[in-house]
Image (cartoon, rainbow, N blue to C red):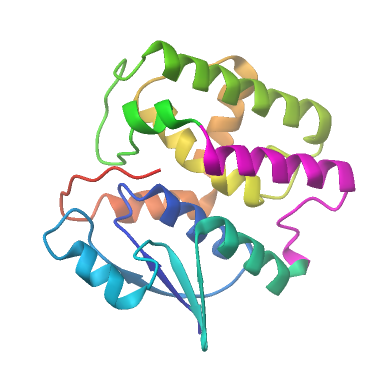
Amino acid sequence: MPTLIIGNKAYSTWSLRAWLVCRAAGLECEEEMIALRRPDTAQNIRARVPSARIPALVDGGLMVWDSLAIAEYVAERAPEAGLWPADPAARAVARAVTAEMHSGFASLRRTMPMDLKADHPGQGMTPETVADIDRIAALWADCRTRFGAGGPYLFGARFGIADAFYAPVATRFATYAVDLPAEAAAVRDALLAYPPMLEWRAEAQQEEAAKTRDG
């Protein structure tokens, strides 16, 4: 059975993305959690992952690090899961919006860190963060309008990689009580109601308190 090395569930957004992709693919994994923001965190991560970053997926003698690389690996390992849309145009857009999340929205990450154990309504709303929020809402509306018929997720009935990459954003919108247009609010609610997401959030509530910021 593969092992997914992750950080704290309350705070580690990249870990959440990789974990959701594995669950959406039906890939059973052992979980190995390395606590973040502790004196020995860097040492513990480096002892397991040469890149010194998590998440990492260990599958036999193979290690895949970086959440997007993990997502692509899992999608190839389980093509029947449909983690990318079957339609070429939808698949191209799904990859583009996922890549934009992977590399962008720095202000949102900085001013509204994911925290599944807290409520911070109204905090973090800098002009740059508002611009990030507006861009995400526009992306979500476009995906739903063009490709979302038949289901509640960004590309329809199946929860896919794009949904996994924006799921931590949905938690931020809830934690910071961000006012969203109706289409974006519906996407937020669908992502938060995804059963594995409910499981992750429940487990996050049981963790010991810690302070960490992550993408």
Seen from this angle, which residue lies furthest left?
A: 39
Residue 53: quadrant of the picture: bottom left
Residue 179, visible in the rendered structure: no
Q: Is residue 34 magenta?
A: no
Taking 134 as reference, is 41 above or below it? Answer: below
Residue under the point 35% across and 24% down: 176
Taking 69 as reference, is 184 above or below it? Answer: above
Viewer-side residue, 21 vs 34 = 34
Residue 213: quadrant of the picture: top left
**Residue 8 located left or right of residue 196:** left
Seen from this angle, which residue lies furthest bottom?
A: 61
Residue under the point 52% across and 57% down: 67
Seen from this angle, which residue lies furthest front?
A: 51
Q: Which residues are magenta?
A: 80-104
**Residue 117 located left or right of residue 153:** left
Taking 204 as reference, is 119 above or below it? Answer: above
